[in-house]
Amino acid sequence: MGEIPFKGFWSQLKDRKVIRVALLYIIVGWVVMQVGEVAFEGLGVPAWSLGLLIVLVLLGFPIALVLAWAYERTPEGIRRDRVNPSVLRSGTDDDRERAPSVAVLPFDDMSEKGDQAYFCEGIAEEILNALCKISNLRVASRVAAFQYGRKQADISEIGRKLRVKAVLKGSVRKSGDRLRITAQLVDTSDGYHMWSRQFDRQLKDIFEIQEEIANSIASVLSATIHRKPDHQQRRTDPKAYDFFLRGLSYFARHTTQDNVFARQMFSRAVEIEPEYGRAWAGLAYTYGFEYMYFNASNVNLIEAKRISARALELAPELAEAHVSAGIAHCMSQSYKDSEAEFEKAIELDPKNYEACYFFGRAKVHEGDMKRALKLFESAARVRPEDFQSVLLQAQLYTSLGNRDKALEVTRKGIERVRAILELNPDDNRALNMGAFALLRLGKKSEAKKWMLTSMNNAPMDSIIQYNAACFFSLAGDVERALDCLENCLIKVGNINREWLVHDSDMDNVRRHPRYAQIISSFPG
């Protein structure tokens, strides 16, 4: 136990080039003293001068080490470096930080009209997904990396905050069927390029470009590739792929309206390319998400099952197809079928966050809290910046009567929430779920402010209203909790009844007469 902080400190010394400077200084100092001894004797310099030279060389040694620690050399010159104390403390992550690591930023849109942001983000996300399948390469999550990319943060800051050794950035100029893609892999320790390449190709070549970039990064970072080329992807119509990327861009925002837009884009993709398995999986996601988060209607359930079955038929090797089927089976309470699909998704892609996260949610629906905990823990490891999987653990530990553990994971969760809000203060999901963490930690005033802000930002979002009901239930405001719960039905539609039944956050309102009236309106 006692060696862990030292290992973290030793890693910092190497990263900041302190050890390199020390060795270089010793060599140069020794040479200077040897030259001084010979030169001083030939020039008739007093004997005490050699002693003074030795003293000066020795005094300069600690000064050189301090300067090496405090300043870094970058393409812009020498500048002061900022120490991240958490790196020195977090020795348990030392092995992870020694592994090759990279963050992929959204590519810059250099198109004439500046209307290709979705395409630029899509390309970056596709490369990120390819890199995630490399077993010994650690890749920062999309959420964190893209937030930094939008802020145009300094490369060394990104490296420290995301704990990655390299950053991939680039730009895209798209004009009709012509593409110019520039990509650079940058060392976060000194800002220098490790690899760069410009591609002048046609839109149909986009898949080859993405694969070449991923392979080059793996080679430069000495990571071993264990993935097979997706030949079906290469045969996809470029126009269908363009709509698919538009769908991904909308879907990543996870709002009611953006989910509708994403569905429209995925639908256009499958109209153009009827056998495009990934687009069918994306389309199934939109129905599964709407059922789970926004509107638990029979129409959404039927479509989620039908479309996910089509995705599985076309792309049985795709983890996302099995995740979409797992969600659909869970919503129809076919829990054994749901488990089989999620297990297959994890087998195909052990780093798939959605597989772990939604498998965990499925287990909550089923009432298997202990298995859900394990799955949320896995999701939190796969995506170290994610707060949702951590805060849901707190809720489950509370349900299981382990208050101490609930507080422990709550503290961890609120740290992740604050990190996300630092990047994007308008992240409504972070505000909404973070309010629960603050309430559990006794920070009631700040918690209420966060919750009300999220409610005002999304008055027509049923999951926000449902979370507000849970929040006010925990806070002891029963009437307001029931008002929010009722709003879930009046404003948007239905939320899922199984989740509500097993949700310990609602325990304070279950005996109220209004609660029985409200829950009787829910499906199932």
Image: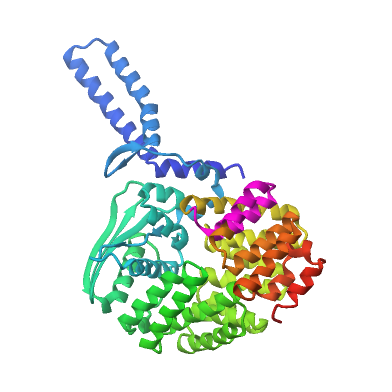
Residue 465 position, x and y percent, is 63, 65
Q: Residue at x 26, y 60 (%)?
A: 196
Q: Is residue 268 above or below residue 17?
A: below
Q: Which residues are magenta?
A: 425-453
Q: Main secondary structure of the magenta part?
A: helix
Residue 411 appears anywhere in the view? no
Any part of residue 238 in sight: yes
Which residue lies at the image location 72% right of the left edge and 67% below the top edge? 503
**x and y percentages locating residue 37 in the rendered image:** 25, 20
Q: Position of residue 24 (x, y in %)?
A: 32, 36
> Quadrant of the image for the N terminus?
top right
Does the stretch in magenta take in 3?
A: no
Task: Pick whichever, 255 or 52, lies toward us.
Answer: 255
Instruction: Work out whether 65 lies above or below 356.
Output: above
What color scheme is it? rainbow
Query: Could you tell whether 441 is left or right of 155 in the image?
Result: right
Side of 25 relative to 307 (left or right): left
Figure quadrant of residue 117: bottom left
The residue closer to the viewer here, 58 or 184, is 184
Q: Residue at x 57, y 43 (%)?
A: 3
Q: Residue furthest left?
A: 43
Does 339 sit above or below residue 486?
Answer: below
The x, y position of residue 118, in whole percent, is 36, 68
Q: Residue at x 45, y 59 (%)?
A: 140
Where's the C terminus, which quadrant?
bottom right
Confirm whether the magenta stretch covers residue 441: yes
Residue 241 lies left or right of residue 427; in this view the side is left
Q: Which of 269/259 is in front?
A: 259
How many labels, in total?
Answer: 0
- Seen in the image, is 58 located left or right of residue 297? left
